[in-house]
Image: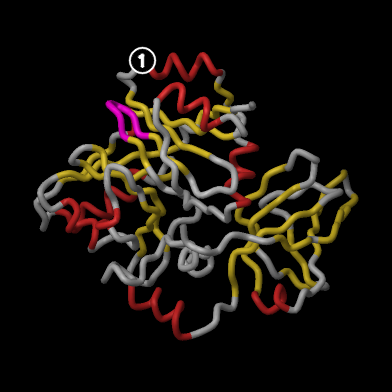
Amino acid sequence: MATTLTDLNNFDLLAVSGDEAAKFLQGQLTCDIDKVSSTQSVRGAYCDINGRVIADMRVLLNGSSYFLLTTRGMGFALKKTLEKYIVFSKAAIKIETSSWERFGAYGSGATQTLQSIFHAVPEKADGVVCQQDCLLIRLPDAQARYEILISTDNDDLRDQLEDQGITDDLEEWELADIRQGSVHINADTQDTYTPQLLNYDLTGVIDFKKGCFPGQEIVARMHYRAPAKKRLYRATVKGIRAASDSMIMAGNESVGEIISVAMTETGQYELLAILPCELVEQKAALELRNHQEDGSDARVSKATLQILDLPLSSS
């Protein structure tokens, strides 16, 4: 059975510790910190007062510290923002990225492979197995998929993973994220999108029962009081290249914004894009277009964009 191990060292890791660490994070993040334990992680986000997403993260408990696992480049920005408020709490925050490594495991044999290395794997989505200097996280996915955080001091475990073979090709991993509707904020997109545009309010990143957080009133008003005009959708296209600068057209009007894209095993492309809900619900004809410059002649390639199903229920 096949197992692919992928180098995912494109992350930042913050550690929040202290007597009031949980209380502090509960008032800052969109997720319910009370649900985090040594065996359970949660996905969350940090929003500004206008309800726009500054960063998204997975929250884990490692010993007495809460880990915030986020995209590379977001650690310093998130730390700087949280430090404005943490001075009022008996808690401290520091960047731990250089002390840890991160890997992904997927494929039909992933569970069996990790079982042989760790002797235990989490059975449910967002579940965690904590061992000395290591955290193993199961992601929400139709096929078992895992993230592994390993301390840089744990040479033995790193050697066991290297014996399995580690690839730095992220195409399949990014495709799996697209198929789960998983979008991560980076330095170019922070403070750009509301949770609603990224479906965070539908996929469990926002917990509307946990109480207040920055921007909570605006985020809740968008979710409860008015139907969304735009949301994140998954789509596919074949016959042409799809990229972040490709245009999504309805007739002669540009109507969409591509957030992420990856090539499939058959050479087609799948992508996540923010699109008008009305056009999708009406099954309007959508087209992907690429403008290519060839000397003095401008050429346009185009192909039909097909909307695909996307998981929208929280894990």
Q: How many marks?
A: 1
- Magenta residue check for 152: no
Nearer to the camera, 59 or 299: 59
Would you place residue 225 above or below residue 166 in this image?
A: below
* Residue 74 or residue 69, whichever sits in front: 69
Query: Which residue occupies 53% across, 39% down?
Result: 145
Give, as a single range, the part of the protein colored magenta: 130-135
Residue drawn at x 68%, y 66% as measured from the top left: 256
Is 132 colored magenta in this rendering?
A: yes
Q: Secondary structure at mark 1?
A: helix
Judge by depth and name the residue closer to the eye, 108 or 281. 108
Q: Mark 1 sits on what residue? A: 155
Amino acid marked by disc 1: Asp
Check the image and report above or below for 158 versus 281.
above
* Residue depicted at 35% across the width and 59% down the height: 46
- Residue 14: image quadrant is top left
Horizontally, is 243 left or right of 208 in the view?
A: right
- Which quadrant, please, contains the N terminus? top right
Residue 223 position, x and y percent, is: 45, 77
Q: How is the image coloured?
A: secondary structure
Q: Is residue 216 above or below residue 177?
A: below
Quick one: label 1, few (<14), some, or many (20+) residues within 10 Å? Answer: few
Query: Which residue is nearer to you in this view: 254 or 9?
Result: 9
Give the x, y percent position of residue 174.
Answer: 60, 42
